[in-house]
Amino acid sequence: MGRHVSFVIGLTSFLSLLLAQSESSAQWRGPGDWHMGPGMMGGWGIGWFGGIFMIAFWILVIVGLVFLIKWLIHMSKGHTEVRHGGSRALDILRERYAKGEIEREEFEEKKKDLGY
């Protein structure tokens, strides 16, 4: 039932677009006429440069959104604190082991606790 309704809506939309296109195309009379002429500035617009800039703009927007989402996910998991804190903790643990403050078994146990 859902596919049938979607098909009917899609077909109706497509046909209405075709109808709208044919009616608007029939109104164009020529460049010398005041009605639906060649466009802004008498046809001397920015041409295909506008299309390139538009595509580049949307690519930049999409890439920016992707990086923003990746950054937000990264920050929500707290990776920066674990990496910097974990590395410093391991350095302190190694120093304590090197000084003889802790035994090998305790060093290995604390190293596992830190996730190394």
Image: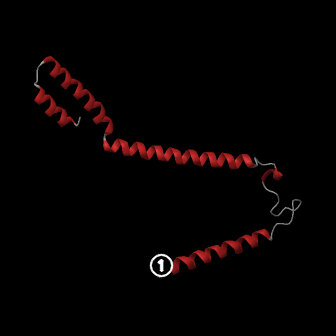
Which residue is at a point 23% across and 24% down the rendered structure image? 91
* In the rendered image, the vertical position of residue 31 relative to residue 24, given as above or below: above
How many marks are shown on the rendered structure? 1
On the image, the x and y values in percent for residue 44 come to 81, 48
Amino acid tagged 1 = Gly
**Badge 1: residue crowd in 10 Å (few <14, some 14–19, many ≥20):** few
Which residue is at a point 12% across and 19% down the rendered structure image? 100
* Left or right side of 8 for 39: right
Q: Helix, strand or loop at disc 1? A: helix
Question: Which of the pair 20/89 is nearer the observer?
Answer: 89
Quadrant in which residue 84 is drawn? top left
* In the rendered image, the vertical position of residue 98 relative to residue 43, given as above or below: above
Mark 1 highlights which residue?
2
Quadrant of the snapshot with the C terminus: top left
Quadrant in which residue 8 is drawn? bottom right
On the image, the x and y values in percent for residue 80 come to 33, 35
Q: Residue furthest right?
A: 32
On the image, the x and y values in percent for residue 56 come to 62, 45
Way the structure is coloured = secondary structure
Which residue is at a point 10% across and 25% down the rendered structure image? 103
Question: Which of the pair 45/54 is nearer the observer?
Answer: 54
Question: Which of the pair 22/10 is nearer the observer?
Answer: 10
